[in-house]
Amino acid sequence: MRAGRLRHTVSVEQQSETYLATGEPTQTWTTFISAIRCEIRGTGGGERRYGTQTENEPATTLTFRYEDAKTITTDMRFVFGARVLNIQRLEDPEGRGERIIATCGEVA
């Protein structure tokens, strides 16, 4: 993994439950990792149909060093400036623990 390709810095957020003054639980996003280096690439995107349902295709991939991203799960999301990216899939393409590729869809 070449360091020069990791030119973007994103933060990782996870969903957590907090309570309002009335005692009612509410879901909020809190920072899990404040800064992690990665490569961001747009992959086009599109739509896929399953019967009567339409599902958006992922439009962005992020590549990280394995050691930096091994605790990230698909329940989390990335924040890059004003962009919010929901994680749809995480994979170690070679299975050697060198890099992780996250396939994401952008929140509108």
Image: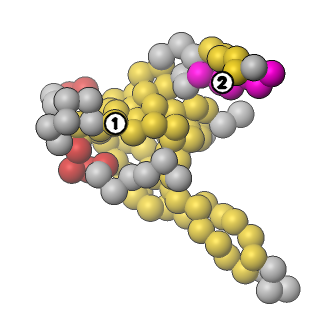
Res 57 quadrant in image: top right
Res 9 quadrant in image: top left
Residue 91 is labelled as: 1
The residue sitting at 48% across, 19% down in the picture is: 42
Question: What percent of the width, then of the height, locates residue 94?
Answer: 19, 30
Q: Residues within 10 Å of mark 2 (few under 14, many from 20)?
A: few
Q: Residue furthest right?
A: 22
Q: Amino acid at mark 1?
A: Glu
Question: What percent of the width, then of the height, locates residue 4?
Answer: 20, 28
Can residue 60 be found in the magenta stretch? no
Is 108 positioned to the left or the right of 82 in the image?
right
The residue sitting at 51% across, 52% down in the picture is: 76
Residue 8 seen in this snapshot = no
Q: Give the structural element (helix, strand or loop) at label 2.
A: strand
Can residue 56 be found in the magenta stretch? yes
The residue sitting at 58% across, 32% down in the picture is: 105
Q: Which residue is mark 2?
A: 56
Q: Magenta region: which residues?
A: 52-57
Question: What percent of the width, then of the height, locates residue 89?
Answer: 45, 37
Question: What percent of the width, then of the height, locates residue 71?
Answer: 33, 56
Rounded to the nearest angstrom, the CA distance separating label 1 from label 2 is 19 Å
Residue 105 is labelled as: none
Q: Is residue 101 above or below residue 69?
A: above
Q: Give the structural element (helix, strand or loop) at label 1.
A: strand
Q: Amino acid at mark 2?
A: Asn
Is 38 positioned to the left or the right of 73 in the image?
left
Res 65 quadrant in image: top left
Q: Is residue 51 above or below residue 21?
A: above
